[in-house]
Every structure is written in structure tokens, then in C-alpha cells.
């Protein structure tokens, strides 16, 4: 049930909206829309999964996404081309993650405090680079990453950005399951002091995981740019909460030591299905927020109850 619970929840939520929602909800077009909207939260949530497994947290994800979208637009305006723009966004995100990891390990300050400060710092940097306005950019194939598929590309089933999420998810799952880094993340999240005594370079692993998460947030900024077709320093406000919620709903534990890529993706899809279904039913945004908040609280409560049962 621990592994199948999120999948069962996703199936029940989807079937609920199929039953009570409009007929348009059960169409392939809506499924494609759900996949496109999930790509942004899902990509950022992959990095958050690794951080939460290691017992950390990152509140600066949304700001890094905004900064990266601006970097993409500025790079395209400078004539760098799409690939250098993507590389620049990933590098900007990785640098922010590196700063997070370094401050957390060197200053020995709680990740919540460090990343809360970085949330404001990076958001301010994004606004400064964009001169507090949206940054227009030349049209390239980057804008097609999350756009609806034209008739001649329906064979792809979903847009390129969704396939990118799938590829990154497979790579992240491989790292967590088959590499030394993945084993060290679970060890640190389960018991940091024991991991240190067993020879795990705790500080180095934390810096690496925050850097990787920052790079994934940078790639999320590329997808955000694709969706908006501009670099926007004010975008993705509150995205970090959606990302953390996706991990927790998918079975990740805020206490550390638990989490899976599949569970995280399922959690992200659950949130998107709820928002899409309520929107198509004509319910106001405040209802969507209440429903999402209730699900998050319930997921955390179930996680804490399960840990108390295990301790007993």
C-alpha cells in the first residue's frame, strides 16, 4: 500500500472528475494538457525528491526557475542560440544550488533558513537582470517544448518537454537506486550521524545534491520559458510549495530517508488533475487551493502517523 497508495489515489481522483466533471475532461486533449502542466512541477520535483530523501528542503526553487527563464531570454537575445541558452539556464540553477549547499554545510545553518534567504536573493537577482519586466526573446524551437502538438506531430503523443521529464525521471531513478550517491542520500536522510560514522562524506554529498537540484530547477526554467515564450522574473511564485507537495503526496517523508521518483511524479499528476478538473467544472481558484491544501495536510498527517506506528 505504501508503494501503490499514490497510484491508487491518482486513479481515484481522475475517475472522480471523469464521473462528475464535463465530458471534455475525459478527452485525449485534456490528458495532453495535464501532461504539459505537470512537466514544470515534475521536473523541479525530481531535484526536491533527492533533497528531501537526504533530510533537507529547498524553498528557493521557484525563484531559481524565474531566474533561469530570464537567463534563457537574455542568452537568446545575445545571439547564443537555443542550446547555449539551455546550458546557461542549467548552469545558473546549478550555481544557485551550489551556493545553497555550501552555505548549509559550511555555516551549519538549517536548510529552511538558508533557502528562505536564497528565495528572496535569487528573486531579486532575476528582477535585476530582467530590469523588473518581462524579457522578450526571438522565436526558436524552445517555445515548442510545451506547446500543443500540431497535426503532423501527433505521433509524438505528448510534447517534447514531457518526454524530457520522462528522461530526467529515469536518470534520477537510476541515480537513487544504482549509484553510491543514491545510497548515501538515503543513509544521510535516515540517520546523518550514523552515515558520517560509516564513512559517508556528508557535507560533500549535500553540496552535490543541492547543485543537482538547482540544475534541474534551471531546466524547469527552460520549460517555463517555453510555456510563456518570455523570460519572466515574477513567475513561479509559490512553485516551491507545489514541488514539495508533489514529493510528500507521492510518499516522500519530510523526516528524510524516504521517497521515490515514481511517487513524486504521481503526486505531481494528482495536483494537476485536481486543478484541471476543478477549473473545467468552473470552480473558483480558492476552491482549488483549499482542496490542494487539504490533500497536502492529509499526506503529511498520514506520513507522521505511519512513522509513529513504526516507532511503536
Image (cartoon, rainbow, N blue to C red):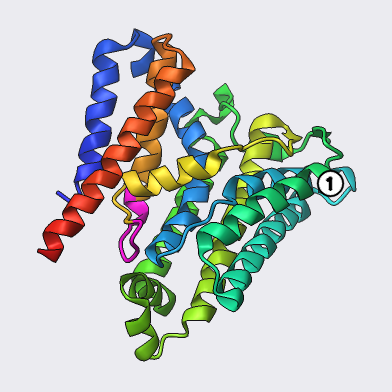
> Is 290 situated left or right of 223 in this image?
left
Residue at the spot x=38%, y=49% of the render?
Answer: 247
Q: Is residue 165 above or below residue 100?
A: above
Front-lying residue, 127 or 14: 127
For the C terminus, the quadrant is bottom left
Residue range highlighted in magenta: 254-263
Quarter of image, res 228: top right
279 over 202 or under it: above or below? above
Where is residue 284 drawn, in percent x and y? 46, 13
Q: Position of residue 248 (x, y in %)?
A: 35, 48
Q: Is residue 16 magenta?
A: no
SS class of the residue under badge 1? helix
Instruction: Count every numbered label the image shows and give the total.
Output: 1
- In the foreground, 194 or 231: 194
Vertical relation: 86 (above or below) 276: below
Q: Position of residue 28 (x, y in %)?
A: 40, 22
Magenta span: predominant SS is loop
What residue is shown at x 48% (from left), y 58% (from top)?
Answer: 57
Quadrant housing residue 32? top left
Instruction: Please rate how many residues cluster around mark 1, counting C-alpha atoms within 10 Å: few if below 14, some from 14 to 19, many from 20.
Output: some
Residue 260 colored magenta? yes
Q: Is residue 168 above or below residue 232?
A: below
Rendering quarter of residue 211: bottom right
* Outermost residue to the left: 312
- Residue 172: x percent and y percent? 44, 61
- Residue 52 horizontal side relative to residue 74, left or right: left
Q: Is residue 3 visible?
A: no
Residue depicted at 27% across the width and 38% down the height: 298
Q: Is residue 130 visible?
A: yes
Left or right: residue 306 compared with residue 188: left
Which residue is label 1 attached to? 129
Q: Viewed as shown, does residue 176 lie left or right of 6?
A: right
Amino acid at each position: 500500500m505504501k508503494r501503490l497508495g499514490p497510484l491508487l489515489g491518482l486513479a481515484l481522483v481522475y475517475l472522480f472528475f471523469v464521473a462528475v466533471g464535463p465530458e471534455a475532461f475525459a478527452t485525449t486533449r485534456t490528458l495532453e494538457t495535464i501532461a504539459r502542466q505537470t512537466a514544470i512541477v515534475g521536473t523541479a520535483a525530481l531535484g526536491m525528491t533527492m533533497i528531501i530523501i537526504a533530510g533537507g528542503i529547498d524553498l528557493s526553487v521557484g525563484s531559481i526557475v524565474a531566474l533561469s527563464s530570464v537567463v534563457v531570454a537574455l542568452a537568446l537575445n545575445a545571439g547564443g542560440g537555443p542550446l547555449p541558452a539551455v546550458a546557461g539556464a542549467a548552469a545558473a540553477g546549478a550555481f544557485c544550488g551550489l551556493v545553497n549547499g555550501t552555505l548549509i554545510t559550511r555555516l551549519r545553518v538549517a536548510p529552511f533558513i538558508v533557502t528562505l534567504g536564497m528565495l528572496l536573493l535569487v528573486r531579486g537577482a532575476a528582477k535585476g537582470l530582467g530590469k523588473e519586466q518581462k524579457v522578450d526573446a526571438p522565436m526558436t524551437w524552445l517555445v515548442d517544448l510545451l506547446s500543443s502538438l500540431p497535426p503532423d506531430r501527433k505521433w509524438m503523443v505528448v510534447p517534447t518537454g514531457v518526454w524530457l521529464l520522462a528522461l530526467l525521471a529515469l536518470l534520477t531513478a537510476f541515480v537513487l537506486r544504482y549509484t553510491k550517491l543514491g545510497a548515501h542520500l538515503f543513509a544521510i536522510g535516515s540517520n546523518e550521524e550514523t552515515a558520517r560514522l560509516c564513512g559517508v562524506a556528508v557535507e560533500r554529498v549535500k553540496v552535490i545534491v543541492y547543485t543537482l537540484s538547482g540544475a534541474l530547477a534551471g531546466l524547469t526554467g527552460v520549460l517555463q520559458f517555453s510555456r510563456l515564450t518570455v523570460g519572466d522574473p515574477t513567475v513561479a511564485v509559490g512553485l516551491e510549495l507545489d514541488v514539495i507537495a508533489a514529493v510528500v503526496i507521492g510518499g516522500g517523508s519530510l523526516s528524510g530517508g524516504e521517497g521515490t521518483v515514481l511517487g513524486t511524479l504521481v503526486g505531481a499528476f494528482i495536483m494537476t488533475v485536481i486543478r484541471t478538473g476543478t477549473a473545467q467544472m468552473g470552480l473558483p481558484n480558492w476552491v482549488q487551493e483549499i482542496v490542494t491544501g487539504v490533500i497536502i495536510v492529509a499526506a503529511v498527517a498520514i506520513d507522521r502517523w505511519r512513522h509513529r506506528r513504526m516507532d511503536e
